[in-house]
Amino acid sequence: MNSCRLLRGAALAVLLLVPALADVTGKWTAAIDTQIGIQNYTYDFKVDGDKLTGRATSQFGDTSITEGTVKGEEISFVENLDFQGQPVRITYTGKVSGEEIKFTRKVGDIATEDFVAKRAK
């Protein structure tokens, strides 16, 4: 009987140490101030376990999200954009805080940009 209580207590302690995955499923919007002007984005995220997929849509097109993960409040993914016939790899890292995600994105070797995405209403 005491061993059962110890096992339950140990299991509970382990669960408390594992960070809960942030719920990012759904649409998010952002206006990103870039070297070529404001880019308006809509992200449509889907989460399965810690795997993130979905789409990124801007005035430059609609692309699949690849290499996506959600670990606790941390989110990361890649957008492989075709910009005027040239492939551009955009790497995103961010932290979820309620209805906002504070992102940093690295646009190839060209620029690094910080912005906030908000859950679409």
Image (cartoon, grey):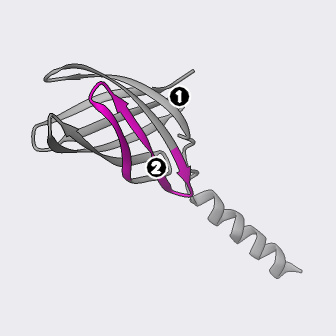
What residue appears at the point 55 percent right and 36 percent down from the top-left corner? 26
Quickly name the residue at label 2.
53
Mark 1 element type: loop
Q: State the image coordinates of residue 27 (x, y, percent, origin top left).
A: 51, 31
Span shown in magenta: 46-66
Which numbered tag is attached to residue 108?
none
The image quadrant of residue 98 is: top right
Q: Which residue is mark 1?
A: 99
Q: Secondary structure at mark 2?
A: strand
> Residue drawn at (50%, 50%), measured in percent from left and top?
72
Does residue 93 lie above or below 8 as drawn?
above
Which residue occupies the extreme right position in the image? 1
Disc on the earlier residue, 2 or 1: 2
Residue 34 x %, y %:
19, 24
Residue 18 is situated, as x and y percent measured from the top left of the image, at 57, 59
Q: How would you rate the neighbour count of disc 1 (Cα within 10 Å): few for under 14, some for 14-19, many for 20 or more?
A: few
